[in-house]
Image: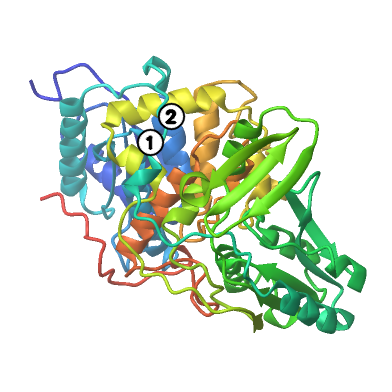
Amino acid sequence: MSVLDGKELRIVGFLCNWCSYGGADTAGVARATQPTDLRIIRVPCSGRVDPLFVIKALLGGADGVLVSGCHPRDCHYAAGNFYARRRLEVLKQFLPVLGIDDRRFEYTWVSASEGQRWQQVVTLFTERIHKLGPAPQLEDAEPLLRVADMALTALRPLGTGQKAALDELKAAVKAKLPELDCVIGWQQGRDAAHTVPLFMRTPEDVDKLVWGPFNVNNPAVYLPSFKGKKVGIVVKGCDSRSVVELLQENLIRREDVTIFSLPCEGTLDMARVDQELGRYKIIDKVEYDEAGVTVTADGTAHRFCMTDCAQGKCYGCAMPSAVLADESFGTPVQVTPGDAAPPELALLDSMTLAERLSFWRGQMERCLRCYACRNACPMCVCRDYCVSDSRDPHWMTQEDSAREKLFFQTIHALHLAGRCTGCGECQRACPVGIPILALRQQIARAVAQLFDGYRPGCNPDDVPPLLGYEVVEKNILERDWK
Ligand code: FES
């Protein structure tokens, strides 16, 4: 049945004012026959289309979304569509991890004189959406809870870091302390099986510095709040990438930051540790060996082997040593990067689209909307104007629904596109253990494929790919609807 005769579906079109909107107008003036499913929203430029618009439409019940702008090199604002092309391509590759068929989203270029091309684009896209049928809705999906299998990922050597040169590090920090306002590291928390951030201002503070698998926090999250001050930081490999990304984005200045590093042998998944320890009154002792940690609580010994209880991000970590440091101690750990997907992403890869939608429905029903994921993220720097708090525009309601929560998570992930260093703080901070790092890992995979293996936070001189463009993109095919 022709799409002109069938039941209408809900398709949202974001059209640039200067070209595609004119193209649609030209088609209308020429009385070109078109399907009527498309609801057009006029935007000043395709560069104005935030992926948030597309996600909002798709999660809100649209069966398809079409973005159309001026042809490359014809943008009224010179480069809006070049920036849009990168963002929208990353978005297209991201949608399947949510359980949304990427064929439901398309972007293209139509000029004001191309009424015929507009007719072709809108007819072909509407036909495609009719073939796919109405979009499955998150609210209709049956909640599905599955846990990632850590054995899916190739292991790298893990340990407890007890041979690390901690004394040398402390001596170096003490020597440098008079020139700095503060040095950030870790100290023992409520007991020897937990750590909290340490802000060292005196030599006595430095003596509290600890190193080991309980150093789970990423201290780089505090760096922007010290902007303009001289500050030191002790980092693991993944933390150092966050520092480099902050430098790349000019959120801190290199001359203000002194980086101390030790090679990391892995950190523990504290959610699993706390679950195993259960309720206890007192930690009697914590004993380390090469393979793991034995924690004795209320007289009962609990064994945490690194190969079983490390954080998911540590299993396939390719950068256990700092990518940038002023003072490094110990021998850098060399790891051969593998191409296996991280465990949580591998779990999603093994599911169908319908299962992924059910998976996120189940996970989002557990979300408390506490925003700990946002607050722990070192790269989430617009907290003063976060979409979750903004009332003008009012992007998010206070509704306690899986859809609103998934909307927030996807926006958070997309704001980190090409910026997330994979430190996993979002997932670690989540009090109910939702594997939200997988969303960022899918984007990181798409960014690496599209931009020649780009990995955020590796070189302070790199420009994050979504902050730039190429006139001719090597790995992004031009949209052709012939
Ligand atoms: Fe049309 Fe920028 S003005 S895409």
Give me the disc on residue 98. 1
Question: Which residue is more in the foreground, 239 or 301?
Answer: 301
- The answer to whether residue 23 is above or below residue 240 is above
Give me the disc on residue 119. none
- Relative image position of residue 175 (x, y in whole percent): 83, 84
State left or right for residue 50 relative to residue 32.
right
Query: Label 2, on which residue?
Result: 360
Mark 2 is surrounded, within 10 Å at the Cα level, by few (under 14), some (14 to 19) or many (20 or more) other residues, namely: many
- Relative image position of residue 283 (x, y in whole percent): 76, 40
- Which element is circle 1 on? helix
**Of the residues shown, which amino acid type is indicated by label 2?**
Trp
Q: In terms of image quadrants, where is residue 82? A: bottom left
- Relative image position of residue 62 (x, y in whole percent): 36, 27
State left or right for residue 287 relative to residue 187.
left
Instruction: Give the residue at x 36% y 28%.
Output: 357
Does the CB distance between marks 1 and 2 fall below 8 Å?
yes
**Of the residues shown, which amino acid type is indicated by label 1?**
Leu
- Which element is circle 2 on? helix
Mark 1 is surrounded, within 10 Å at the Cα level, by few (under 14), some (14 to 19) or many (20 or more) other residues, namely: many
